[in-house]
Image: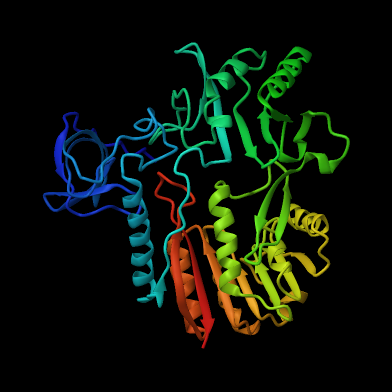
C-alpha cells in the first residue's frame, strides 16, 4: 500500500484572530475561511502571527511566532524554556485565568455528557505554581550534533529532548540541578546508553532512579554514589525492567529502608504516614494532595460505626486516613504491588480495620468477595479511563455518599451521568490545580443518595 504523502505546509506566517476561546488542550481557536484553527500559545481575544504545523481535513494546527495584540491575561512565563519545552503548555497565561479555564472545561464536560450541574461549585484547590512537582520521568540523551548530553522533557510537538538548563515546575532539588545531571551522564562510560531518570521526592529523602541499557563500570558506580552523597539523593539503578530496580546509595539492609515517606492530616487533626517506593505511583503535587485528601474526608464525613469502600486505592493515599475515621475500610486496587504497599501502610500506622484486595475494576469484578458487602460511603479515584464498570454497579453497595476524584473531566462527566441515573444527586464539584501551567484538569465531586 502506498504511503500517504504529508501535505506541504505554507512557510509564511499568517495572522490569526483568537475569537473562539480555548480548546480543552489550551490552544487558541481561530477561523479561516470557515475552517477551525488551533493555535499553540495564543489566548482568547488576541491577534497573533502563527505558522502552520499541520493541516488536516477539518481543522489546522498552528503555533504562535509573534503576539500582535496581547490579552490582559498574558504574562511572562516563569521559565526561560517555556516556548520549546513540552512539559508545560500554559505558562504564558496568568494563573487565575488558568484556573478559570480548567473550571470552564469541567463545566462544559458536565453539560455535554448529561446536562449536569452540581448544586454548588466549590472554590478551586490551589497551591504553589512553581517548584511544585516532586515526581517525574526525565529523558536523557547524548546528541552527537551538539556534542552534549540533554536531560529533561520532550520538545513541544516532537520526540526530541528540549535543550533546557533548569525546570521551574520541578522541585528545585531536581529542577535546578539539570546541568549537574547532564554533567553526571557525560562523565559515565554508558553516557550513550542511559535513556532516563525517574525522580521521586518524599518528605524525608529524595530518590533518583538511573535507567541504564548497558552494564556500569565500577568507576560509573562510584561516580553515581558520589553524586548521591553530594546532592542528598538516594541512588537507585534500573538495568532492565521495573523489577530490577535496586538501591546502591545509601546501602540497603532491608526493604523498609527503600521507602520514601509523606504525611497527611485528617480533618480531626490525626496524622498518618504513607511509605512508598520511588517507582510507585504517587501524586506529583504534595501540597494539592494534602488538600485533596482532607477535602474528600470532610465530604464523606465518615462516622465511627460506618464502613467505607476505597476503589482504585493505590498505596492507601485515601484508605489509610479514612481508616482513622470509620469502623472498617476496604481498599481495592488493580496493581498487586500497590496492594502489598497498602498493607504495609496499614501496619506502619497500627491500623487493624483495613483490608486490601487486588482486582481489575475495569472488568467484571462482581464475583469478588468484597463486591457483595454493603458500604456506607465510597471513594473512587480511577485512572484517566474512568470507572464506568464501577458506576454501573454502585446500587449494589447501598452507599449514602460517593466522592469521585478524577484526572479526566470527560470520563468524570460520563460516569457522573451513570451515578445520577442510579439515584444520586451531584452536590459539589470543583477543580484542583494539581498541574499548574498545563491543561490537565484534576477535579473532585460529591454525590449523595436521594
Whole-percent x and y of residue 312?
64, 62
Instruction: Give the total number of marks visible in the rendering.
Output: 0
Q: Position of residue 248 (x, y in %)?
A: 79, 27
Question: Residue 164 or 359: which is nearer the viewer?
Answer: 164
Examine the rendering and report whether any part of residue 41 can be seen: yes
Picture coordinates of residue 236, whole percent (x, y): 73, 31
Q: Is residue 49 left or right of residue 444?
A: left
Q: State the residue lying farthest toward the bottom.
A: 450
- Measured from the top left, where is residue 311 in percent x and y? 65, 67
Which residue sits at x=58%, y=79%? Answer: 401
Q: Is residue 430 left or right of residue 54?
A: right
**346 to 251, vertically: above or below:** below
Above/below status of 274 relative to 42: below
Residue at x 40%, y 74% (from the top left corner): 120
In the displayed orientation, state which residue is furthest to the front.
269
Q: Is residue 220 left or right of residue 160?
A: right
Residue 57 seen in the current view: no
Residue visible at 36% across and 40% down?
91
Amino acid at each position: 500500500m502506498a504511503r500517504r504523502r504529508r501535505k506541504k505546509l505554507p512557510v509564511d506566517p499568517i495572522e490569526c484572530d483568537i475569537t473562539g476561546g480555548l480548546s480543552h488542550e489550551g490552544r487558541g481557536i481561530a477561523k479561516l475561511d470557515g475552517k477551525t484553527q488551533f493555535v499553540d500559545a495564543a489566548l482568547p481575544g488576541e491577534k497573533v502571527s502563527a505558522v502552520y504545523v499541520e493541516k488536516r481535513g477539518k481543522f489546522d494546527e498552528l503555533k504562535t511566532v509573534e503576539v500582535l495584540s496581547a490579552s490582559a491575561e498574558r504574562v511572562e512565563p516563569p521559565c526561560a524554556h517555556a516556548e520549546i519545552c513540552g512539559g508545560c503548555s500554559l505558562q504564558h497565561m496568568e494563573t487565575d485565568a488558568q484556573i478559570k479555564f480548567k473550571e470552564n472545561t469541567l463545566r462544559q464536560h458536565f453539560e455535554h455528557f448529561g446536562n449536569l450541574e452540581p448544586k454548588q461549585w466549590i472554590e478551586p484547590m490551589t497551591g504553589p505554581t512553581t517548584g511544585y512537582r516532586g515526581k517525574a520521568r526525565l529523558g536523557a540523551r547524548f546528541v552527537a550534533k551538539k556534542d552534549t548530553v540533554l536531560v529533561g522533557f520532550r520538545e513541544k510537538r516532537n520526540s526530541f529532548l528540549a535543550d533546557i538548563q533548569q525546570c521551574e515546575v520541578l522541585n528545585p532539588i531536581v529542577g535546578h540541578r539539570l546541568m549537574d545531571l547532564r554533567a553526571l551522564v557525560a562523565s559515565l562510560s554508558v553516557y550513550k546508553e542511559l535513556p532516563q531518570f525517574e525522580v521521586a521526592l518524599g518528605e524525608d529523602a529524595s530518590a533518583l532512579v538511573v535507567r541504564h541499557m548497558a552494564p556500569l563500570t565500577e568507576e560509573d558506580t562510584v561516580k553515581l554514589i558520589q553524586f548521591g552523597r553530594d546532592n542528598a539523593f538516594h541512588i537507585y539503578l534500573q538495568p532492565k525492567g521495573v523489577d530490577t530496580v535496586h538501591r546502591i546509595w545509601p546501602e540497603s539492609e532491608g526493604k523498609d529502608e527503600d521507602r520514601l515517606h509523606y504525611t497527611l492530616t485528617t480533618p480531626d487533626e490525626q496524622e498518618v504516614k504513607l511509605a512508598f517506593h520511588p517507582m510507585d505511583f504517587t501524586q506529583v503535587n504534595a501540597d494539592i494532595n494534602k488538600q485533596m485528601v482532607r477535602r474528600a474526608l470532610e465530604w464523606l464525613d465518615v462516622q465511627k460505626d460506618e464502613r467505607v469502600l476505597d476503589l482504585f486505592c493505590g498505596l492507601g493515599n485515601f484508605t489509610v486516613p479514612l481508616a482513622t475515621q470509620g469502623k472498617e475500610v476496604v481498599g481495592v486496587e488493580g496493581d498487586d504491588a500497590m496492594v502489598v504497599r497498602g498493607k504495609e501502610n496499614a501496619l506502619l500506622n497500627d491500623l487493624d480495620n483495613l483490608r486490601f484486595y487486588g482486582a481489575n475494576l475495569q472488568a467484571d469484578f462482581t464475583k469478588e468477595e468484597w463486591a457483595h458487602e454493603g458500604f456506607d460511603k465510597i471513594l473512587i479515584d480511577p485512572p484517566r479511563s474512568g470507572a464506568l464498570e464501577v458506576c454501573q454497579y454502585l446500587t449494589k453497595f447501598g452507599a449514602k455518599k460517593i466522592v469521585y476524584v478524577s484526572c479526566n473531566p470527560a470520563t468524570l462527566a460520563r460516569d457522573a451521568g451513570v451515578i445520577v441515573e442510579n439515584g444520586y444527586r451531584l452536590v459539589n464539584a470543583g477543580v484542583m490545580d494539581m498541574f499548574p501551567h498545563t491543561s490537565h484538569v484534576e477535579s473532585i465531586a460529591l454525590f449523595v443518595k436521594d
